[in-house]
Image (cartoon, rainbow, N blue to C red):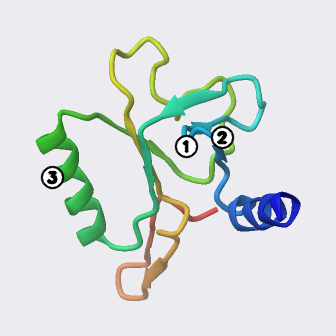
Amino acid sequence: MLISLNKLLKWWSSDLNFELDFNGEIYLNDVSQLNKTRIFSIFYPRTINDIEYLISKAKSEGKTISLRGQAHTMGDQTLPSRNANSLNYICDLKYMNRVEYDGRTKEVLGEAGTT
């Protein structure tokens, strides 16, 4: 049962880019895999309302928010400081990937998760 549960967890989390240990701790890493960092929680917003909720929640709980787009950075720029006294929230923006084009102004607006 443990093997199939582990395979299920790997399949489920393969697109989410985080590790969950058997104590329930959540860890993130950058693409270099050299900066494993423990976090409090990770959010995958899909709308501006989701982000507004996250900001309100973080403010009420005294948490900070670290942002990341596609998690392609190296050198832990998108991870919270490991020197922080409290564990922080991660706001992973990869599902905010819409692109809008205004033909009149010739402007393109791309959300943070767009690659």
Residue at image x 48%, y 58%? 93
Residue closest to the eye, 70 or 50:
50
Q: Which amino acid type is marked by label 3?
A: Ser
Q: Which amino acid type is marked by label 2?
A: Asp
Question: SS for tag 2?
Answer: loop
Residue closest to the eye, 29 or 32:
29
Residue 74: x, y in percent? 69, 30
Residue 87: x, y in percent? 39, 29
Query: Could you give the CA–CA distance between mark 2 and mark 1, rounded to whole angstroms?
Result: 6 Å
Query: Is 37 displayed left or right of 83 in the figure?
Result: right
Return the residue found at the far front.
1
Task: List the residue tagged with mark 1.
Answer: 24
Task: List the residue tagged with mark 2.
Answer: 21
Question: SS for tag 3?
Answer: helix
Query: Could you give the CA–CA distance between mark 1 and mark 3, rounded to whole angstroms?
Result: 25 Å
**Circle nearer the N terminus (1, 3):** 1
Q: Which amino acid type is marked by label 1?
A: Gly
Residue 96: x, y in percent? 47, 69
Query: Could you give the CA–CA distance between mark 3 and mark 2, rounded to whole angstroms?
Result: 28 Å
Residue at image x 65%, y 23%? 75
Question: SS for tag 1?
Answer: loop
Relative to 38, is 84 above or below? above
Marker disc for residue 56:
3
Q: Looking at the image, do the residues carrying marks 2 and 1 touch, with CB atoms under 8 Å apart?
A: yes
Q: Looking at the image, do the residues carrying marks 1 and 3 touch, with CB atoms under 8 Å apart?
A: no
